[in-house]
């Protein structure tokens, strides 16, 4: 058996690069699972659906909402992946380009916004989106009558959080490309990354099915508001630090 000191230095570098990429992707997953706009819209939508339809139909429409959210996440990821792929074609190491510094700057800005601006001031769970947009989402949640309405609402609620998610899709695409160079099965990680944003929706659906109501869910969201702020801020900062130290300055 070869000793570690007899192995080529590139072996250690590749292993370290792999774990840094994996850490960045998992931190991005943590942020995606902590965002509150889609879960908030879904909680309202399911509440209204249960009030108008049978439990089976409401549950069926909830699954279509989740499918819409999933399709939206997949489309955004693919867009980010192809944007990053263009940079890889134009430059061998795009993580050392101006594009990488721009993404890092956006992530640091989002860290501050996640802590100070993601939730509006007050005791409730009002988010950063405009009141006009919030009223429109509420109206669509109330008036959804068909599977296509539920699917569309799920997709639109994901698009509304692009300011917080698109930089994550870009940097995650870059890291997944880095791992694919090392012959890692990156497609599995891509699927996991796209599925993660829907996990809070399945959790809310389970809570409704086990007897909870909208008031219970909202109290839980208010209770977790400070924790969500901290998670968003620290995760964005951690991704920025890892990317600067191990990618841009490496």
Image (cartoon, rainbow, N blue to C red):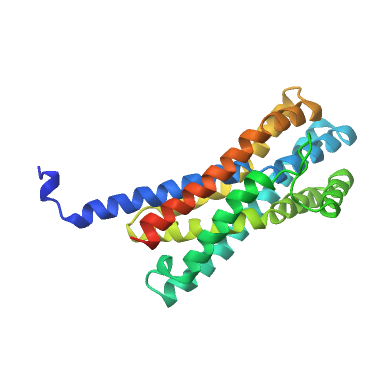
On the rendered structure, is 214 left or right of 197? right
Residue appearing at x 55%, y 55% in the figure: 107
Please indicate, yes or no, whether residue 188 appears anywhere in the rendered image: no
On the rendered structure, is 245 left or right of 233? left
Which quadrant of the view contains residue 232?
A: top right
Residue appearing at x 78%, y 42% in the figure: 126
Q: Quadrant of the N terminus?
A: top left
Please indicate, yes or no, whether residue 151 appears anywhere in the rendered image: yes
Residue projecting furthest to the top: 211
How many callouts does the rendering have?
A: 0
Q: Nearer the viewer, residue 61 or 214?
A: 214
- Give residue 118's position: percent from left, percent from top: 69, 46
Q: Is residue 15 above or below residue 58?
A: below
- Give residue 149's position: percent from left, percent from top: 81, 51
Residue appearing at x 53%, y 69% in the figure: 83
Q: Is residue 88 above or below residue 20?
A: below
- Give residue 169's position: percent from left, percent from top: 55, 57
Residue appearing at x 33%, y 53% in the figure: 17
- Give residue 156's position: percent from left, percent from top: 74, 55
On the rendered structure, is 153 left or right of 31? right
Q: Nearer the viewer, residue 147 or 11?
A: 11
């Amino acid at each position: 058996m070869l000793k570690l000191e007899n192995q080529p230095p590139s072996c250690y570098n590749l292993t370290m690069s792999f774990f840094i990429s994996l850490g960045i992707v998992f931190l991005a997953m943590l942020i995606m699972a902590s965002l509150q706009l889609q879960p908030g819209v879904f909680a309202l939508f399911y509440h209204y659906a249960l009030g108008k339809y049978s439990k089976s139909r409401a549950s069926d429409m909830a699954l279509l909402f989740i499918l819409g959210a999933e399709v939206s996440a997949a489309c955004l990821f693919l867009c980010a992946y192809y944007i990053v792929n263009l940079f890889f074609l134009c430059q061998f190491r795009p993580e050392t380009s101006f594009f990488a510094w721009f993404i890092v700057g956006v992530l640091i800005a989002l860290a501050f916004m996640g802590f100070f601006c993601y939730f509006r001031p007050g005791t409730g769970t009002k988010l950063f989106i405009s009141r006009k947009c919030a009223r429109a989402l509420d109206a669509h949640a109330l008036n959804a009558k068909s599977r296509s309405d539920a699917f569309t609402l799920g997709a639109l609620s994901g698009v509304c959080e692009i300011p917080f998610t698109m930089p994550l899709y870009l940097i995650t695409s870059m890291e997944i490309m880095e791992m694919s160079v090392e012959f890692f099965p990156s497609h599995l990680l891509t699927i996991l990354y796209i599925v993660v944003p829907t996990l809070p929706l399945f959790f809310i659906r389970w809570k409704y099915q086990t007897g909870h109501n909208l008031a219970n869910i909202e109290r839980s969201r208010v209770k977790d508001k400070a924790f969500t702020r901290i998670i968003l801020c620290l995760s964005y900062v951690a991704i920025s630090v890892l990317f600067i130290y191990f990618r841009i300055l490496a």
